[in-house]
Amino acid sequence: MSGVTESGVTESGAGGPGATGPGGTGPGGTGGGSLGRGFGWLWASYAVSTFGTRLAFDAFPLIAVLALNAGPAQVSALAAAGLAVGAVVAVPLGPWVEFRRKRPVMIASDLIRCAVLLTVPVAFAFGWLGFAQLLVVSVVVAAADITFRAAAGSCLKSLVRREDLLAANGRFEATSWTATMLGPPVGGAAVGLFGPVVTVAVDAVSHLLSALGIRAIGRGEPLPAYAGPARTSRLRSGDLLEGWRYVLTSPALRPLFFNTVLVNGLIMATAPLLAVLMLGDLGFAPWQYGLAFAVPCVGGLIGSRLAGPLVARFGEHRVLVTSGVLRVCWPVGLAFVGPGVPGLVLVMTVEFALITSVGVYNPVSATRRLELTPPDRVARTLTAWTISGKLTTAALTALWGILAALTGLRTAVALAGVLLLATPLLLPRRGVGSGPEGGRGSDSEEGGGSDPASAPRSGADPDPGQGTGSPSPVA
């Protein structure tokens, strides 16, 4: 669900001479002040692609279950293989993106996603669609998604001032949850009326419109100041691991990295199992399934609006840790979902509590991560972060598919929920340096973050609930 975030653009840090955004809301705000024309076009591009992807909510699992009669193991394999192989393919892309103009990379990634997604409805129309094609499309979309995110992180830092990063991320977060609230029920109704692949076609078109919006940012984009001819012509072997090296040696980013990767992986590992449980065993219709995860997204709107005021009052570190703890308290309740109205009410209640917590956590953590990462490492750091998240999610998804086959769907979902309760031990502690760009708020010692404006179906970062791909501009 993904799920969620950027004119004379220069690749300086936010607040540098190339940054725009007069009239910003200032630190801690998520208000309505202008953040600049360039940011406006990026936000519009994000909005249209997000609505397209949320409309295609869990599209590939739905296609696998409804059109190809896939079981839990196959659905889990589809989710895991697409993430894992796509992540491996994307390993060299982060360093490659780092030293190139970002907007052309983002446009190309959008166009690739559009083209490959369109092959699904075409193949379905001619009776050629098979499980193997869904796997290939998942891989290509995943690799293009990682590339897009790597470029978009640097783009955001250059388009808005440092003090406006939280406001920008808050707007992406609110947009993401609005799309998540409206898209799944509409997509579920569309699947019921027109078949399981129509939403994939809409998602493909949304990426085309996103590419046009990014192109409309206009004004030439120079090469990054740190990218000389030698860096753009070839990659160094050390560049491939630089993102991981920076994250793992940063006392501020490292705990957030491990916490985010594990929390997201455990939440997303249960997404295919819940799809099989609700659509299969419990007999919910696709529109009911979409509605169960759409209505609670109002919590994401509430959380994203509260993030700025909470940081201004209590400090970034306290808000980050508190929301990080709250977001893992609820998923264990999904193991007790039953049929009919009571089951829907239970899912909606659990998801509302989870998503409200995530709505606060996402923009705060995403802002902090960008603040802690120097401009010449943003793309590589975001690529390393996203690849690690996807590989972890793929491994846990495959493992949970096996667990479900051995122990049952409910037991596997419950086990993930219990393990999530231990993850706050990985959240950052006080007293760690804030990194190269300083902190914000009264408790700025800690950093890290998850994906800005990434709002997946169960409140995890960074992926869209194993749908057709995430539109999130930053990972």
Image (cartoon, rainbow, N blue to C red):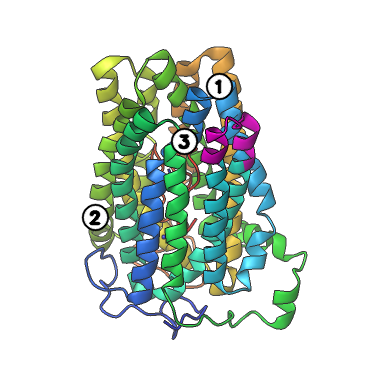
Q: Which residue is drawn at 33% across and 69% down?
A: 40
Q: How crowded is mark 2: few (under 14 residues within 10 Å), some or many (20 or more)?
A: many
Q: Residues within 10 Å of mark 3 (few under 14, many from 20)?
A: many
* Pointer 1 residue: 70
In the structure shown, which secondary structural element does the residue marked by tag 3 occupy? loop
Give the answer, above or below, for where 293 lies relative to 100.
above
Closest to the camera, between mark 2 and mark 3, is 3
Looking at the image, is mark 2 or mark 3 earlier in the sequence?
3
How many numbered markers are drawn?
3
| Residue closest to the eye, 186 or 327 | 186
Specify the amino acid type for callout 1.
Answer: Ala
Give the answer, above or below, for where 123 lies relative to 206.
above
Residue 6 in view in this figure: no
Looking at the image, is mark 3 or mark 1 earlier in the sequence?
1
In the structure shown, which secondary structural element does the residue marked by tag 2 occupy? helix
Q: Residue at x 47, y 63 (%)?
A: 211
